[in-house]
Image (cartoon, rainbow, N blue to C red):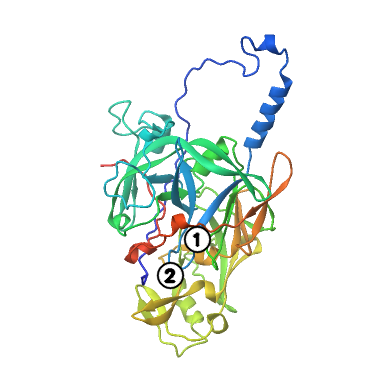
Amino acid sequence: MKSSISTFIYLFLLLVPFVSSTGGVFKVEHKFFGPGLRERSLFNLSAIKAHDTARHNRILAAIDLHLGGNSDPTNSGVYYTEIKLGSPPKRYYVQVDTASNDLWVHCAECNNCKRTEQEFYDPKKSDTGKIVTCKEDFCSNMYGGSYPECKSPDMPCEYEATYMDGSKSSGYYVKDYIHFNQVSGNFLISPEQESVVFGCGTKQSGDLRSGSKGLDGLLGFGQSNSSVFSQLASSKKVRKVFSHCLDGQNGGGIFAIGQVVHPKVKFTPLVPKQPHYNVNLEEIKVGKASIELPTHLFKTGEVAMIDSGATMLYVPDVVYTPMIHEIMSNKPDLKLQTVENHQCFEYSGSVDDAFPTVTLHFEDSLILTVYPHEYIFSHEVSGKKLWCIGWQPLKDKTILGVLALSNKLVVYDLDKQAIGWTAYNCSSSIQLLDDQTGALYSVAAHDLSSASAMSWFPAAAGASSLLVIKSVTTSPTG
């Protein structure tokens, strides 16, 4: 089935703090020295040692998220992972997105949600599922101090995700277990779980309803305390470091939480006090030509967003035109034609031989190289093969999506407030540090796209197969 190039939707999630649920009073007894235990063993050192060992294996652990998807805009153009939620755990496939914060999945009450191969999440069917109420601290902080329409203490804390084209996803927050793969040895994982807050989507509108099949939701890896990543870090389950290596050749790749030891990566500082992973862009070169950056936009350097949830590459309008001119300068005879807002052309040769490499230069001399075969993709229109340019104009913003991030290991170190990358074979493996033992463990690449359980993806019909869900704003419904 022929895919088409759709209009991409991009929004920005408000940075909101996460505060744990309201506290309570509990009867506390020592696990090893309760009533009757002292008579059996005055000092149960073996049990204590076993407990400590198990606990040390749980804290500050590395996590391996198996990836699917690819960077082809005419195929899926997104990457996703498998998670399990609830008790007993049920499987869901969600897009991984570094420009969003919250995790949300389709909920059982949703009658108009896009159907998938998975059963929708139902907190009533989970032994550990709990609806977050409007009186809880989490909800109060989401709404800047208090939920505006909290008429009863049992009223759910609602969310609404609004998109630029008017599409919406809305529902309520729940708290339940998320199950993940803890790295326990070379290419070995063991199951782990933690209670987190996430969105239970009950209604969708606009383009979110289009298409016959799709993903079950979205997993945000933003910096907000409300993200699952931040919740795991605050509970000491993981370090505040994660990385991805998106395989642009074969699909899938690596997505891991933990300190990367190999390969080595050079870093650039994150722009402080920003809700997204923004870095200072100092220069853009197309081949040997430097693109002029207008001073009214780049007084202190352009801020570029690193965004695994975006597919295309976006630059300000005033930068886009000279970029396209330089890209096409070696082939002035080629005729550009606009196909759904993309500049396309007919060509029978190698794009790497004919078109220039684009390099982006960041603070502290970090360079991001984007080759022609990465930013130029093939697209069939009416039986004719065209090549289309992945660079797009976006007013005064620069967003670097998977076309630029694929085939590179990208490391987000929130402890050091820095981000870095290096060119890498994303079909291979990386090494993570085990903080407790000092051991180095290898984590391999995966491709969920090839699994039979995901044989339907990305078979969404028409333009919806290219819908890239971006960050959301959370506000009261109604």
Q: Mark 2 points at which residue?
A: 392
**Position of residue 213 in the picture relative to residue 244 (left or right):** left
For mark 2, give the secondary structure. Answer: strand
- Residue 178 position, x and y percent, is 49, 40
Mark with earlier residue (2, 1):
2
Q: Which residue is drawn at 37% across and 48% down?
A: 473
At label 1, counting other C-alpha atoms closer than 10 Å, the crowd grade (few under 14, some 14-19, many 20 or more) is some
**In this orientation, which residue lies closer to the viewer: 287 or 355?**
355
Viewer-nearest of discs 2 and 1: 1
For mark 1, give the secondary structure. Answer: helix
**Position of residue 261 in the picture relative to residue 124 (left or right):** right
Residue 245 in the image: above or below residue 180: below
Residue 225 in the image: above or below residue 78: above
At label 2, counting other C-alpha atoms closer than 10 Å, the crowd grade (few under 14, some 14-19, many 20 or more) is many
**In this orientation, which residue lies closer to the viewer: 65 or 350?**
65
Q: Name the residue under label 1.
A: 450
User: Is mark 2 in CB contact (under 8 Å) with mark 1?
Assistant: no
Which kind of residue does numbered mark 1 sit on? Answer: Ser
Q: Residue furthest front?
A: 452
Q: Residue at x 44, y 51 (%)?
A: 94
Tell me the quadrant of the picture where the N terminus can be found.
bottom left
Q: Which mark is drawn over residue 266?
A: none
- Residue 220 position, x and y percent, is 47, 49
Examine the rendering and report whether any part of residue 472 can be seen.
yes
Tell me the quadrant of the picture where the C terminus can be found.
top left
Q: Residue at x 40, y 54 (%)?
A: 215
Which kind of residue does numbered mark 2 sit on? Answer: Gln
Q: State the CA–CA distance, disc 2 to disc 1.
A: 30 Å
- Residue 114 position, x and y percent, is 32, 53
- Residue 173 position, x and y percent, is 38, 37
